[in-house]
Image: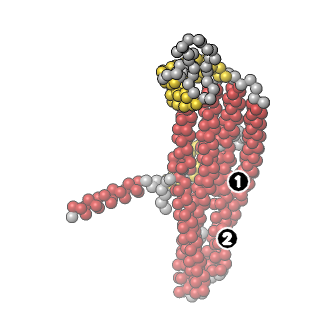
Amino acid sequence: MMWRVLSGSMFFLMTGAVLSQVPASVTLTGCYDSARVNYPVFRENALLQESLNLKIKNLNASWYPQVSLGAQAAYYSDITELDVRIPLPGVEFPRAPHEQYWVFFDISQTVWDGGASREQKLYEQKTTEAAAKQVETEMQQLRERINNLYFLILSLKENEHLYELSRQTLVSRLTGMEAAVKAGAAMVVQKNQIQAEILRTEQLLEDVRKDRKAVLDILGILTGMSFSDSTVLKVPVFHAEVFSDTLTRPEMEVFDLQIAANQQLERALRTRNYPRIVAFAQAGYGNPPGMNLLRNEWDFYWSAGVGLKWNLWDWNTLKHDIRMTSIQGEKLAVRKETFVTNVRTQLAQERTNILKFREAVLRSEEIVRLHHQILSSMASGLENGIITATDYLAEHNTLLQAEISRSINRLQLLRATLAYFTIQGNVETKVSAWEIPVWETISMQ
């Protein structure tokens, strides 16, 4: 019994935890923020920083002493010897052995590298900054995908609302027709026509609900959020629409950072032919010991010194590499200019869409108003047998389509405004408030 109580308690606690993760309402910028946390690509930033840290450590290691262990065994056919004869018995000049052996430690320390490591560090940092900003461009593309899904859900919810109101209106008309049939003022076929239209509307309503659920699931995958059928998607309210050509796109920053990294690479390349100064030392044990070639016995030895290396001529390879780097910078500048041109073209198109949908909303408002008046006058005619159910249903469906068209125009106007600011790159700063959508009650009597 105690186990059942504990199991039940755990079930309700777990259920409550899951339910608490389903928000009652969400905003578009909230979806952006959640996607930034949950979308896998943004985990690359931590990996990029870790990679940069490792590269910097490797470059720093070039200034640490380099220690190596070596061994050598060799046989020389010709050796160092003095061809001098002394006419004394038992006296001979020493000579180097034919077999020679060494075991030694080499130690080298960079004293000056011409600034190569410093310039390379700066290049790696700028390259990492450009790569991190490139990841940020994924957010730009993700915003556009979220925008499409978000407004598709709003549109489907609006259609669901309109179909439900249509169904309720038809049910009300069906009740009146049933009374008229009983009174002999209408034919059964007219009642059946309305009943068939109710079934068709219910099917459309069910299809819209399924579509909305499917799109909500996709939005949940992109954002990592959980949604339910009762979750309300709030509608963004923008500041006064002041359209400008100012761009704050992350892609432009990527181009700027890549150009800066390319310039830094050119500076790093120029250090390639600078002189290098290295201090070195060697300690070992061998036969002969060190440079004492005439000593044929094992002993310790050591040496130390400073070396200079300066590449005075490289057959213009450095010049060619610098020119190739310069060409790459010019290509990046052209790509940036092309990108800006394309974005400004998109802004011009969205500005045209905004003006077009503004006019469409005004026209659709007037169309809906007129069809409301028409349907209202036809409702009494249907109950009095003046018009047929076919005539009424035709006008009813015309009004429904006009309502749907008005809803689409409203959402398209809002979506075009959102698209303009998204393309511009400052959509999150343009949102001034959020409204819970209040679906207008449509009277179809």
Q: Residue at the spot x=54%, y=71% of the render?
A: 206
- Is residue 155 shown left or right of residue 331? left
Task: From this view, report whether residue 221 is shown above or below residue 93.
Answer: below
Task: From this view, report whether residue 431 is shown above or below residue 112.
Answer: below
Task: From this view, report whether residue 124 is shown above or below residue 442.
Answer: above
Instruction: Check disc 2 and give the amino acid type.
Output: Thr
Element type at marker 2?
A: helix
In this view of the protein, which residue sits in the foreground, 274 or 434? 274
Q: Residue at the spot x=67%, y=42% of the render?
A: 251
* Quarter of the image where one finds residue 76: top right
Counting from the top left corner in percent of width and height, residue 383 is at 59, 79
Q: Taking the image as drawn, is residue 338 in sight?
A: yes
In this view of the protein, which residue sits in the foreground, 121 or 349? 121
Question: Looking at this rendering, what residue extends furthest in the left direction?
Answer: 1
Element type at marker 1?
A: helix
The residues bearing labels 1 and 2 have C-alpha atoms spaced at a distance of 22 Å
Pointer 1: residues within 10 angstroms few (<14), some, or many (20+)?
some
Q: Residue at the spot x=40%, y=56% of the render?
A: 18
Pointer 2: residues within 10 angstroms few (<14), some, or many (20+)?
some
Q: Which residue is mark 2?
A: 398
In this view of the protein, which residue sits in the foreground, 35 or 300? 300
Instruction: Check disc 1 and give the amino acid type.
Output: Arg
Q: Which residue is mark 1?
A: 358
* Count of numbered labels shown in the rendering: 2
Counting from the top left corner in percent of width and height, residue 286 is at 51, 25
Q: Taking the image as drawn, is residue 284 in sight?
A: no
Counting from the top left corner in percent of width and height, residue 62 is at 57, 28
Between discs 1 and 2, the one toward the N terminus: 1
**Marks 1 & 2, CB-CB < 8 Å contact:** no
In this view of the protein, which residue sits in the foreground, 216 or 266? 266
